[in-house]
Image: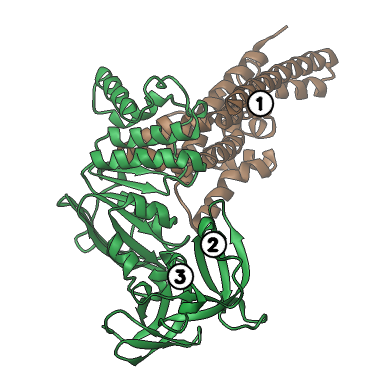
Chain colours: A green, B brown
């Protein structure tokens, strides 16, 4: 079970150049809008023709530009879940599913449609038209329709983006259940870091048409290979960095020296730290520990349970916005130190630092 | 009273509408899948009969179907001719009605979301099935409106018909031509009778179209309200 992708396609802004192999299990493709994610899925499904490349699915060649092979979408046996579901508005739910089952006799189509709806927990809605279904039911129907054809791979384009928050977590559970039961290559495109992490086993970070990182998601989040990947995986704080010894660096934008865990593999160009990895420590510890910096609160931004603190590292009210350090803490924790006198002290723990080579 | 202009008009319009339906829809479906500068020329040629004076269309048709025209010569080799015969009324009406069918079908097919067509392809449907089972049903309201407009245009055709088919009572004399020659011959009562008949047919057509679009709108409204 594997999906091998080598494609090149010129786009107006940049060119899509993607090479990777997915061997079953869900792969999340994370990227900013316009990074080429949707174009990548469409090329695999056969709805776009790459300029050059080769695509093989479970050993079956779907595209080989050198050999002149380009299997049309209808023969690729790839299920594609569209962002807007693309349900046929003039067909009932059951007829939508049966559309992909034309090779079977009528009775068998009905039986398979019913079983697909059962699996997606929309049994009994077969006679309804898509407009008579809720957003979540429409999504389940689209998934049922794609899976009923027993595709050899499943591609999902921003599957949760059209749902409200409440439905989103329920659909996410549905997708996890579906993925577990579908042992074939599954690609999921998203611009949400949380979705990418929760739904994928592996992660591919796409940036301006190129694979910026690919591998186990835990590894990419712990050790992003570049500034770009660190940023796309949600890191908010960066400084340019210069090694000053084998285990310490000078962070120019933060105006401090930091010790790192272990020693450098490659000389770092930047150093980063995730907002929730910044620790607040008692002032009395300030001298005793390393990687501790004084800071002043510039402003805050609240969500129901968390708060983001924007911190100045110099006591200068005119400090540039970009030099502010963003720390994210639970409100419960914030209550314990919000009354302390300034400067506060933050610790940038050596093993939380992201070292980013050029 | 001689009712033949009514039957000739209805038979001509119905036949021309059937031809225009297939040709206009076929051309629109063919055009829909293509892009490029050459397509602007295709659009221009398809719309020409709409903007040219009917006499120009009639003259061009004479050049093609006349004794010395390419099609006329071909037909002569089978010992037949269409000029000044009933088929000529059908040809003239089809050509002038074609642009309306083409434009309406194109607009109707264009508003079908490309996602739906692509979804159908990923579900294994052939291009014919994609057209027949997804594009056509969803574009149907616009296509039907185009068909009604084509029928109305064919019914009202005068200039090109007169040039290509002439005025042969009982064979090529349609209602508009009967009216013209009635006025010409000072037969005022006959002119009024045929005008009344034409207005009645047009009102029935427009009323039917209006009623049908209202029914459609109500059905869509009910769906959207959920």
- For disc 3, the marked residue is A278
Q: Is residue B150 left or right of residue A122?
A: right
Point out which mark residue A336 bears. Answer: 2
User: How far apart, in angstroms, are the residues tagged by discs 2 and 1?
Assistant: 81 Å
Which quadrant of the view contains residue A190?
A: bottom left
Q: Is residue A39 left or right of residue B195?
A: left
**Labels 2, 3: one chain:** yes
Q: Nearer the viewer, mark 2 or mark 1?
A: 2
Q: Is residue A113 visible?
A: yes
Label 1 residue SS: helix
In the image, residue A92 above or below residue A332: above
In the image, residue A264 above or below residue B206: below
Label 2 residue SS: helix
Q: Is residue A42 visible?
A: no
A198 and A250: which one is in front? A250
Q: Nearer the viewer, mark 2 or mark 3?
A: 2
Tell me the residue at 76%/21% (across/down). B179
A77 and A34: which one is in front? A34
């Amino acid at each position: 079970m594997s999906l091998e992708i080598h494609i090149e396609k010129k786009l107006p802004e940049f060119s899509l150049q993607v090479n990777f192999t997915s061997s079953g299990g869900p792969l999340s493709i994370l990227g900013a809008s316009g990074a080429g994610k949707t174009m990548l899925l469409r090329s695999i499904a056969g709805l776009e023709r790459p300029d050059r490349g080769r695509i093989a699915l479970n050993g079956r060649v779907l595209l080989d530009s050198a050999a002149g092979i380009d299997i049309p979408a209808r023969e690729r046996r790839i299920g594609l879940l569209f962002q807007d579901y693309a349900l046929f508005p003039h067909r009932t739910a059951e007829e939508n599913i049966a559309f992909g089952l034309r090779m079977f006799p009528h009775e068998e189509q009905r039986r398979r449609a019913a079983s697909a709806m059962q699996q997606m927990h929309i049994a009994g809605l077969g006679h309804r038209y898509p407009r008579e279904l809720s957003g979540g039911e429409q999504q389940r129907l689209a998934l049922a329709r794609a899976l009923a054809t027993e595709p050899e791979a499943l591609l999902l384009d921003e599957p949760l983006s059209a749902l409200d928050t409440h439905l989103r977590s329920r659909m996410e559970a549905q997708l996890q259940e579906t993925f577990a039961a579908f042992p074939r290559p599954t690609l999921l495109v998203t611009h949400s870091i949380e979705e990418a992490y929760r739904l994928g086993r592996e992660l591919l970070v796409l940036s301006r048409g190129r694979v910026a990182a690919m591998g186990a998601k835990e590894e990419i989040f712990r050790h992003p290979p570049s500034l770009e990947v660190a940023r796309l995986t949600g890191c908010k704080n960066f400084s340019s960095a210069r090694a000053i010894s084998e285990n310490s660096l000078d962070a120019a934008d933060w105006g401090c020296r930091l010790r790192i865990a272990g020693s450098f593999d490659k000389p770092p160009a930047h150093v980063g730290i995730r907002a929730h990895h910044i620790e607040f420590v008692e002032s009395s510890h300030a001298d005793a520990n390393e990687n501790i910096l004084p800071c002043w609160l510039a402003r805050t931004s609240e969500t129901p349970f968390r708060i983001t603190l924007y911190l100045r590292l110099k006591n200068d009210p005119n400090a540039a916005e970009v030099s502010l350090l963003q720390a994210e803490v639970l409100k419960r924790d914030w209550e314990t130190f919000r009354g302390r006198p300034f400067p506060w002290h933050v610790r940038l723990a050596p093993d939380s630092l992201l070292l980013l080579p050029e | 009273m001689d009712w033949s202009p009514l039957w000739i008009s209805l038979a001509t319009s119905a036949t021309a509408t059937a031809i225009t339906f297939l040709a206009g829809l076929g051309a629109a479906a063919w055009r829909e899948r293509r892009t490029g500068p050459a397509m602007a020329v295709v659009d221009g040629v398809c719309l020409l009969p709409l903007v040219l004076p009917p006499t120009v269309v009639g003259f061009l048709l004479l050049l093609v179907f006349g004794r010395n025209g390419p099609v006329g010569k071909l037909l002569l080799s089978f010992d037949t001719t269409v000029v000044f015969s009933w088929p000529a009324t059908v040809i003239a009406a089809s050509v002038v009605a074609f642009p309306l069918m083409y434009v309406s079908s194109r607009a109707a097919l264009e508003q079908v979301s490309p996602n739906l067509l692509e979804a159908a392809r990923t579900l294994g449907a052939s291009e014919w099935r994609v057209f027949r089972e997804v594009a056509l049903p969803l574009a149907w309201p616009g296509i039907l409106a185009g068909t009604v407009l084509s029928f109305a245009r064919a019914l009202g055709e005068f200039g090109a018909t007169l040039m290509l088919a002439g005025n042969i009572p009982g064979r090529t004399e349609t209602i508009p031509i009967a009216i013209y020659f009635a006025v010409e011959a000072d037969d005022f009562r006959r002119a009024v009778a045929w005008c009344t008949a034409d207005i009645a047919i047009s009102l029935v057509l427009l009323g039917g179209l209006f009623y049908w679009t209202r029914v459609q709108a109500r059905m869509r409204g009910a769906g959207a309200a959920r």
